[in-house]
């Protein structure tokens, strides 16, 4: 693992990958390197214009790439269902699902289905997508993987099972951190259920550290008139942040490196930058009871049940 880079990605020929939020940042860098190694990549993006543009850009950078755009709005469970149905009609198997898309530190808002936006997009959208694509992932085993992108900001707080939608109090950064904790709890329980079912599909997670992406830029814009916070984020991007390509390495490691174990969590060596290594995670992200409770609630909220997996 020391010094691991994109050059170390194994050959991905014959494999199909879905990357959410692949039109820019970590998602685009992940999709590009997978395509460079021979994978057929589906860019699952909310904006058709940005998704098509990303596919054109990727083909220009990797002329031999097999890549296509498919619309996916994680803030709308109807869109998630349509994406999964469309994928199943075209392909019987899926080798790699990268749950990358996300929103950060937004003002309070709701998804199309009435969920608080950060929890709805970052966790529930990906929970539903993974469950709906599970038959294709199981069909591709052995070797199939599910990688969910969390964040070091998960350390801001554990999920509040009695207030998942932040109805009592909404603090945008705490809500973001809790949604990233939800990503890790989801992976923890998914890995357990896959193992209990005897499946060889590996569920792991990763975080990019501090990478200069549109996610941070969007968070800065949401600060509105709070100019000191904006300037601090801009200064951090300029002086501390690594590139999106570097930030994608922990995700790519979790997605492709040999020997990745279920429920492993990878991040940059220094926490915010550097080559991928096993990452520290808060103890609450390994709480079995909390993970099962979140899973049960998520099935009820989304209407998506992981029928092939035992409780």
Image: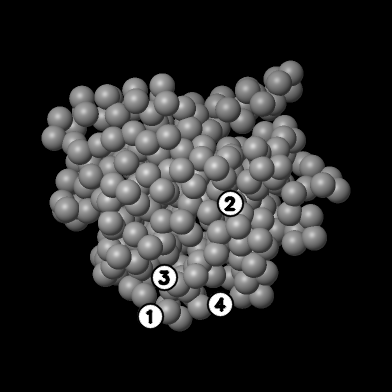
Report how far apart the C-alphas of labels 1 and 4 lie in the structure.
13 Å
In this rendering, does residue 311 appear at all?
yes
Q: Earlier in the sequence, mark 2 or mark 1?
A: 2
The image position of residue 269, as x and y in percent, is 42, 54
Say which label, 4 or 2, has the lower sequence index.
Answer: 2
Q: Which residue is mark 1?
A: 198
Q: Residue at x 54, y 55 (%)?
A: 127
Q: Disc 3 vs disc 2: Cβ atoms closer than 8 Å?
A: no
Do the CB atoms of the residues marked 1 and 4 lie less than 8 Å apart? no
> Residue 289, located in which quarter of the rendered image?
bottom right
Q: Callout 3: few (<14), some (14-19), or many (20+) C-alpha neighbours within 10 Å?
A: many
Q: Which residue is mark 3?
A: 262
Measure the alpha-carbon separation of dots 3 and 4: 17 Å
Of labels 4 and 2, the one closer to you: 4
Q: Nearer the viewer, mark 3 or mark 4?
A: 4
Percent across and percent down for residue 43 are: 35, 38
Q: Residue at x 78, y 48 (%)?
A: 166
Foreground label between 1 and 3:
1
Secondary element type, mark 1: loop
Label 3's element?
loop
Of callouts 3 and 4, the N-terminal one: 3
Answer yes or no: do the residues labelled 3 and 4 have beta carbons within 8 Å? no
Query: To which residue does mark 2 refer?
Result: 123
Give the mark toward the camera: 3 or 2: 2
Report how far apart the C-alphas of labels 2 and 1 lie in the structure: 25 Å
The tag earlier along the polypeptide, 1 or 4, is 1
Res. 311 mark:
4
SS at mark 2 in the image = helix
């Amino acid at each position: 693992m020391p010094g691991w880079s994109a050059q170390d990605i194994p050959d991905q020929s014959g494999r199909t990958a879905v990357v959410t939020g692949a039109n820019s940042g970590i998602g685009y860098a992940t999709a590009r390197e997978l395509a460079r190694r021979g994978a057929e990549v589906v860019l699952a993006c909310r904006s058709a214009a940005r998704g098509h543009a990303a596919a054109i850009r990727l083909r220009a950078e990797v002329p031999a790439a097999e890549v296509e755009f498919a619309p996916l709005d994680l803030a709308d469970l109807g869109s998630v269902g349509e994406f999964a149905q469309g994928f199943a009609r075209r392909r019987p198997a899926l080798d790699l699902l990268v749950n990358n898309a996300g929103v950060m530190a937004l003002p309070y808002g709701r998804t199309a289905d009435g969920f608080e936006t950060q929890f709805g997009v970052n966790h529930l959208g990906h929970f539903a997508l993974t469950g709906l694509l599970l038959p294709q992932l199981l069909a591709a085993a052995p070797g199939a993987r599910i990688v969910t992108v969390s964040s070091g900001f998960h350390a801001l707080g554990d999920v509040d099972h009695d207030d998942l939608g932040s109805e009592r109090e909404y603090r945008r950064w705490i809500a973001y951190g809790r949604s990233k904790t939800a990503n890790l709890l989801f992976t923890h329980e998914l890995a357990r259920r896959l193992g209990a079912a005897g499946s060889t599909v590996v569920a792991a997670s990763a975080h990019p550290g501090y990478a200069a992406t549109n996610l941070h830029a969007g968070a800065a814009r949401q600060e509105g008139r709070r100019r000191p916070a904006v300037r601090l984020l801009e200064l951090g991007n300029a002086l501390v942040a690594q590139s999106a390509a570097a930030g994608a390495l922990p995700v790519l490691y979790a997605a492709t490196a040999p020997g990745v174990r279920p429920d492993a969590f990878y991040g940059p060596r220094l926490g915010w930058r550097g080559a991928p290594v096993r990452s520290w995670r808060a103890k609450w992200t390994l709480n079995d009871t909390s993970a099962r409770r979140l899973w049960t609630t998520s099935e009820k909220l989304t209407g998506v049940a992981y029928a092939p997996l035992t409780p």
